[in-house]
Image (spheres, rainbow, N blue to C red):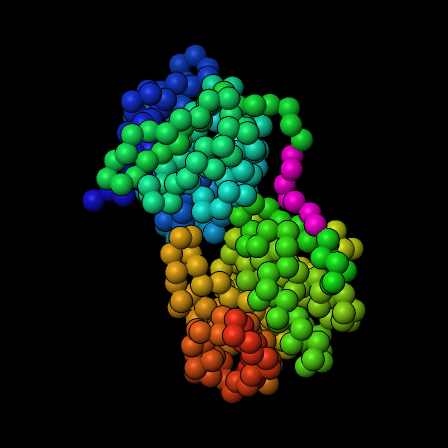
Amino acid sequence: MTDAVVEVVLGELETLGALGAGSGAGSGASIATVETADGEFARALAAVAGRAAGARIRAFSDTGFAADALAGLEAEVDEVSALDASLFAGATVIAGRLPKSLAELDELAEVAAAHADDGVTLILGGREKFLNRSMNEQLARHFGEVRATRGHRKARALVATLPRRGGEPTYPREARIRDLDLEVCAHGAAFAGPTLDLGTRALIEALCSAELDAADVVDLGCGTGILAAWFAREHPAARVVATDRSWAACASAAATARANGLDDRIEVVRATSGAGLADASSELVLLNPPFHDGHEVQQGMANDLFRAAARVLRDGGQLVTVFNSHLRHREHLERIVGPTRQLARTPKFTVTLTTRR
């Protein structure tokens, strides 16, 4: 059965006749999709738009697409690597799933309104239990008309038209972390935004106490790049790689490095679980692993990152990890990477040091 969120978005597009409404005479729709990794909207729209002469589809996923997600479709789909003008320029239709965070929705709407066709129709769907009035208000900052569709199988979509032009880009957002003396930059989808999350703070405090040093360092799942920037500044001889599967995270980390004058010291690599980093290439891995994937809690997500750390660490190399104290990560660290000891623990967070066996 097709996902109800995809169904409600496609149903609205067909009701509006938007897929055949190109801005040029005789042209098909210019479609942009904001996707999950499986390319669900691109696949569904390709089946419909493939019947419209000249239809063009561009697809973006913040986490990248799974292998073959966009292969064998009825219309050509171009994968776009960034949430920018290359995705939205001239688009007459924008479709996708409503983001989890208001900041992510705000950036999506801001960039779409700035670059899409004047007659664009933006339709974003979601499960009704995750929708709230603030989403309508966020879209209304960038579009003149915003409305909700009728519900369908506990799903609903928000429809926005009449893009507002002329505003200056406001992403990435920048703020100063005074107690670290660092600037942090964040795109909308980046975890914790332009702030220092409590887990990263706990990890940095533990690193200060442990007095670890290393020449080759990886910030695995780097987020906004605070760990990479802090370590590079504190250890001027270190070579630091910041890596994450998220475009928003990598773009934020690169901006954070530039803002602190460290862009020549920090290499940013967009990759899932450190793919592409050479085996046994690092002395130290820093890791604040996620355990949410969108709205879903995935407590096993960290294991892929533990396996990545084990792969890129040299024998005897060290992994410093922070995690919520109620999670049973230590037993997985012992099994996947090697002997693990506790560096710090509070009711909220635990920081461990694991040595690659």
Give how far across and how far down residue 346 sits, in percent: 55, 76
Determine the image quadrant of residue 141.
top right
Work out whether residue 29 can be spotted: yes
Taking 109 as reference, is 52 left or right?
A: left
Q: Is residue 120 above or below residue 290?
A: above
Q: Residue at x 52, y 85 (%)?
A: 340
Determine the image quadrant of residue 11.
top left
Q: Is residue 80 magenta?
A: no
Work out whether residue 239 can be spotted: no
> Which of the two residues, 86 or 98, is positioned nearer the viewer here?
98
Taking 227 as reference, is 245 left or right?
A: left
Give how far across and how far down residue 19 sits, in percent: 35, 24
> Which of the two residues, 199 or 169, is positioned nearer the viewer here?
199
> Which of the two residues, 103 or 94, is positioned nearer the viewer here?
103
Give how far across and how far down residue 35 sits, in percent: 42, 43
Q: Residue at x 27, y 41 (%)?
A: 154
Q: Residue furthest left?
A: 1
Q: Residue furthest top?
A: 25
Taking 338 as reference, is 264 left or right?
A: right
Give how far across and how far down residue 198 sits, in percent: 59, 64
The stretch of residues the image draws in magenta is 169-175
